């Protein structure tokens, strides 16, 4: 068979899977918006809002290695189907509790933890499947398209949530989310994803699940450039996630849910445009330059977001913050996808996700208490920082979170400048050989 049918078949399969996932993301984003507003209005505090994000992130950190090992052993398509169905039933639990009038904040913690559990399997399976479907020179474009889908959900969800809230209520929104999970799973029923030969099929060995789970650590330890890339992403994730979950309470402190929707839509529009650019361009040939440049621009946007308590200002800053992210992620995923053999990508991607996102739950864990107990009192009217930072940032509820965003943006900028001088990271693309063939296997 010639290369062209292979490429076309893989692209068609990827687009079918991508379409189903985008629909599911829109459903989940609508529910997330509605429940996020409900949590803040119910508690009036930042910490419970952040805990929702924390419980969603923990399963990936705790179960990532085991999930990655199983992704390399099992059929990746079936794993994604089961993950979508499992997430659907976690959402159904929230719906039933809401209808019974018994929904409490801790129920949402449990539900998002289950969603995170299924996501710990789905994400490495999805990432490893993409490299089996798309030629390696188009990895950046595929990542851009994935980021475009995420941005579309971010744009559509706030608008839909606002329009549907008064018509079908929270319960109707959750029903829509429940249905979209099955649309994503249904799309997977009509495609085939090529499976790489497992290592034990090649050399006759059968390592234990525990040894397989740890293999990703060994792989990265032997490749300093990839390990440095993961370390860099972990630091950036900590800086971002120590504040990003507080965006909603910061905006709601000086405005209302429609303004929050405007801010989220603006940020998603930035990511959409950035995703379209990454889809068409794929990023610079030296992928790490796209990572550095995009991260520096993004850090400026995050710092600006906290400076003023005006909806239009925060919306513009969030556009700037998220606009370069698709190019950053396209560069990171292109490097990872090229340098990791297909038969071990589940394990290695899972470990990379675990390490890269290790800063995520830590950031979530500290952000709420830091906001409620330290930064908010410092920036309150008459607070210790009111005569200095308060003069040009304002004082009162939400301004402490604004200061946190300024600090996080500056930290992102300095981390990127510092690590850009490390040779193993700067030259990772040239120093490590490609592990992916030029043409992907046949897909239908």
Image: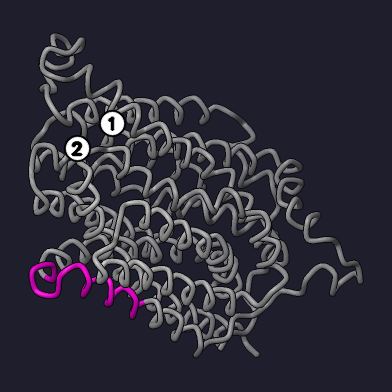
Please, what secondary structure does the residue beneath circle 2 have?
helix
Q: Is residue 168 magenta?
A: yes
User: Does the magenta portion include 96?
Assistant: no
Q: Position of residue 372 (x, y in %)?
A: 28, 28
Horizontal arrangement in the rendering, residue 200 relative to residue 313 (left or right): right
Q: Which residues are magenta?
A: 164-180
The residue that disc 2 covers is 250
- 104 up-or-down from 389: above or below: below
> What x and y, as percent, mark residue 305?
21, 35
Give the quarter of the figure containing the N terminus: bottom right
In-front residue for pair 95/416: 95
* Whether residue 152 is visible: no
Q: Secondary structure at mark 1?
A: helix
Q: Position of residue 161 (x, y in %)?
A: 17, 65
The disc at residue 281 is none
User: From mark 2 to mark 1, how far is it between C-alphas?
Assistant: 10 Å
Q: Which residue is mark 1?
A: 405
- Quarter of the image for residue 17 reads bottom left
- Residue at horizontal 61 percent and vertical 39 percent from the top: 427
Q: Position of residue 362 (x, y in %)?
A: 48, 36
Considering only vertical position in the picture, is 172 above or below 444?
A: above
């Amino acid at each position: 068979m010639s290369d062209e049918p292979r490429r076309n078949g893989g692209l068609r399969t990827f687009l079918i899977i991508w379409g189903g996932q985008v629909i599911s993301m829109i459903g989940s984003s609508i529910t997330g918006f509605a429940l996020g507003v409900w949590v803040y209005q119910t508690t009036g505090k930042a910490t419970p809002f952040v805990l929702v994000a924390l419980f969603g992130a923990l399963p990936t950190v705790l179960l990532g290695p085991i999930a990655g090992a199983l992704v390399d052993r099992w059929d990746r398509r079936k794993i994604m189907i089961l993950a979508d169905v499992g997430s659907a039933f976690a959402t159904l639990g929230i719906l039933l509790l809401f209808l019974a009038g018994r929904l409490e904040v801790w129920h949402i913690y449990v539900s998002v933890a289950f969603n995170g559990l299924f996501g710990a399997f789905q994400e490495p399976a999805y990432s490893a499947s993409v490299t089996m479907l798309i030629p390696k020179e188009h990895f950046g474009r595929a990542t851009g398209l994935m980021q475009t889908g995420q941005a579309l959900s971010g744009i559509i969800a706030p608008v839909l949530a606002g329009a549907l809230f008064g018509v079908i209520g929270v319960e109707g929104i959750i029903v829509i989310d429940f249905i979209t999970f099955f649309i994503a799973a249904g799309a997977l029923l009509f495609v085939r994803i090529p499976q790489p030969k497992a290592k034990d099929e090649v050399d006759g060995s059968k390592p234990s699940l525990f040894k397989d789970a740890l293999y990703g650590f060994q792989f990265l330890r032997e490749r300093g450039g990839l390990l440095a890339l993961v370390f860099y992403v972990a630091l950036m994730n900590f800086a971002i996630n120590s504040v990003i979950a507080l965006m909603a309470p910061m905006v709601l402190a000086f405005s209302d849910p429609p303004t929050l929707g405007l801010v989220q839509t603006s940020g998603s529009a930035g990511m959409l445009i950035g995703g379209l650019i990454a889809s068409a361009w794929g990023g610079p040939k030296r992928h790490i330059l796209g990572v550095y440049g995009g991260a520096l621009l993004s850090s400026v946007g995050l710092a600006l977001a906290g400076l003023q308590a005006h909806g239009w200002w925060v919306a513009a800053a969030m556009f700037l913050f998220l606009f370069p992210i698709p190019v950053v992620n396209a560069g990171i995923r292109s490097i990872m996808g090229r340098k990791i053999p297909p038969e071990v990508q589940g394990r290695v991607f899972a470990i990379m996700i675990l390490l890269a996102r290790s800063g995520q739950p830590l950031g979530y864990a500290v952000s709420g208490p830091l906001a409620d107990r330290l930064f908010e009192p410092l920036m309150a009217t008459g607070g210790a920082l009111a005569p200095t930072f308060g003069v040009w940032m304002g004082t009162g509820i939400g301004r402490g979170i604004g200061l946190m965003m300024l600090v996080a943006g500056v930290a992102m900028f300095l981390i990127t400048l510092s690590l850009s001088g490390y040779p193993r990271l700067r030259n990772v693309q040239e120093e490590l050989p490609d592990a992916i063939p030029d043409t992907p296997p046949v897909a239908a």
